[in-house]
Amino acid sequence: MKEDPQAKLERVYNEQQIMESNLNLLQQRIEVVQVYITNYRSGLLVLEEIEKRKEDEEMLMNVGGSIFVQAKLVDPDRVIRGIGNGVRIEQNVADAKAAIIEAVSSLEKQYEALTQEYQRLIAHASNLNAQFQQLAAQIQGATSPGKEE
């Protein structure tokens, strides 16, 4: 049994609405991952700068939001790193750098997977839009004055 064109149009419209919502959510996830990558890379730059410094040396330290503070390094070989849920651990700079590099790598893979999924959904949304336009034109043509039924 062939689906009624009006019912099919409504089905495609509903699918378009769901797809748009999914695209918006996916875009938000992509943006969050981008923020995390930027944050970790900023931390990595600070760690690399700390590696070049000696005890009691002063440096400008990026605290985020384009704000820097003058800091005196008490122990440039040790840093405290947040690992989630308010938990912090003390590590040497090399271990902290390795953990950050691993986190950035993982986030970049996640970013790539999300952008591929986003592109796939965009293509599907484009197909739905074409179907919708075609169905709408068919229905419009079938109900136009002067058409024989």
Image (cartoon, rainbow, N blue to C red):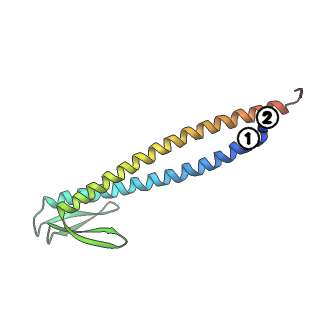
Is residue 1 rendered to the left or right of residue 18? right
The count of marks equals: 2
Q: Amino acid at mark 1?
A: Leu
Q: Nearer the viewer, residue 66 or 124?
A: 124
In the rendered view, would you say 105 is above or below 8? below
Q: Amino acid at mark 2?
A: Ile
In the rendered view, would you say 2 is above or below 95? above
What is the residue that sits farthest to the front in this orientation?
1
Q: Position of residue 5 (x, y in %)?
A: 77, 37
Is disc 1 in contact with disc 2, using a CB cutoff of under 8 Å? yes
Q: Secondary structure at mark 1?
A: helix
Q: Residue at x 35, y 54 (%)?
A: 37
Between discs 1 and 2, the one toward the N terminus:
1
Disc assigned to residue 46:
none
Residue 126 image-quadrant placement = top right
Q: Position of residue 93 (x, y in %)?
A: 18, 63
Disc assigned to residue 139:
2
Q: Residue at x 25, y 57 (%)?
A: 44
Q: Position of residue 122 (x, y in %)?
A: 54, 41
The alpha-carbon separation of the residues under discs 1 and 2 comes to 9 Å
* Quarter placement of the N terminus: top right
Residue 8 image-quadrant placement = top right
Q: Nearer the viewer, residue 17 or 51?
A: 17
Is residue 15 rendered to the left or right of residue 77? right
10 Å neighbourhood of mark 1: few (<14), some, or many (≥20)? Answer: many
* Quarter placement of the C terminus: top right
Residue 85 image-quadrant placement = bottom left
Q: Residue at x 70, y 32 (%)?
A: 134
Q: Position of residue 129 (x, y in %)?
A: 64, 38
Q: Residue at x 18, y 58 (%)?
A: 49
Q: Secondary structure at mark 2?
A: helix
- Residue to which mark 1 is pinned: 9
